[in-house]
Amino acid sequence: MYMEFGGTLHNFISHFSGQPMPEVLIGRTALMILQGLEALHSHGYVHCDLKPANVLLFPSKIVGEPWDLKLADFGLSKEPSCTNPRSSLSGGTKEYMPPESLGPNRVKMIGPAVDMWALGCVVLQMFGGYPVKMGECYRWRLPRLVSPLANDFLRRCMALQPSRRATAADLLKHPFVCTKPKSYDSFSTVLLLS
């Protein structure tokens, strides 16, 4: 039996033992996640549980690319809605849920902005090695940890107002994910395939 599965992004991040992944790998990974989200959103669905454990990695079939990935676990995915109570955000993983979905005054309706916040959390986790804790000011320490391009990308994902978050289609044009590196750290490919 042939299986192409190379693990999850969660497993891959854990190989870095709390250290940041190389930024070039984070940008490429964010690009591939965005491509999946844009396809999902353009078909009228929101993932609602995007997190590293729901991003599957595969050895790339493209020479020079570190891996391919696929989004997984669509059990909580929904159609976005302004009026349908069945489209409220129930479930999901707290560390990746946007602030409007948490607390006693949480907004019940969902849309693609939910996934964009979660993408920001995933990218932050790749930089820091651990899930974001909403009670900490982790996000505002970014200028010391990341490039200005990555910082801008994260701020567009994680705007506090859902209406101000960028869409997947918008972020597919962002320089943080559009800059193709000359090469990747071979360490990353060895980890993935081991």
Image (cartoon, helix red, strand yellow):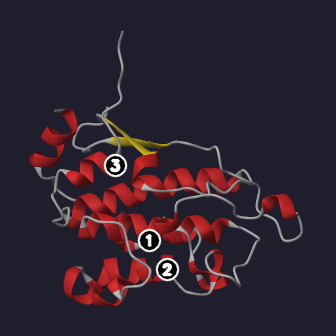
Indicate which disc, 1 or 2, sits on the residue closer to the N terminus: 1
Q: Residues within 10 Å of mark 3 (few under 14, many from 20)?
A: many
Amino acid type at circle 2 is Met
User: Picture coordinates of residue 1 (x, y %)?
Assistant: 36, 9
User: Picture coordinates of residue 174 (x, y %)?
Assistant: 43, 72
Amino acid type at circle 1 is Gly
User: Picture coordinates of residue 65 (x, y %)?
Assistant: 26, 44
Do residues under tags 1 and 2 come within 8 Å of each other at their CB atoms?
yes
Q: Residues within 10 Å of mark 2 (few under 14, many from 20)?
A: many
Distance between the alpha carbons at the discs numbered 2 and 3 = 20 Å
Furthest residue in direction right, as rendered: 83
Label 2: state its secondary structure.
Answer: loop
Relative horizontal placement of residue 24, taking residue 161 as reference (left or right): left
Q: Please give the residue where the numbered disc 2 appears in the rendered image.
A: 158
Snapshot quadrant of residue 66: top left
Furthest residue in direction top, as rendered: 1
Distance between the alpha carbons at the discs numbered 1 and 3 = 14 Å
Q: Please give the residue where the numbered disc 3 appears in the rendered image.
A: 9
Q: Please give the residue where the numbered disc 1 appears in the rendered image.
A: 120
Furthest residue in direction front, as rendered: 104
| Rendered position, 15 above or below 72 | below
Do residues under tags 1 and 3 come within 8 Å of each other at their CB atoms?
no
Q: Residue at x 36, y 41 (%)?
A: 68
Amino acid type at circle 3 is Leu
Relative horizontal placement of residue 59, taking residue 159 as reference (left or right): left
Q: Residue at x 42, y 52 (%)?
A: 32
Label 1: state its secondary structure.
Answer: helix
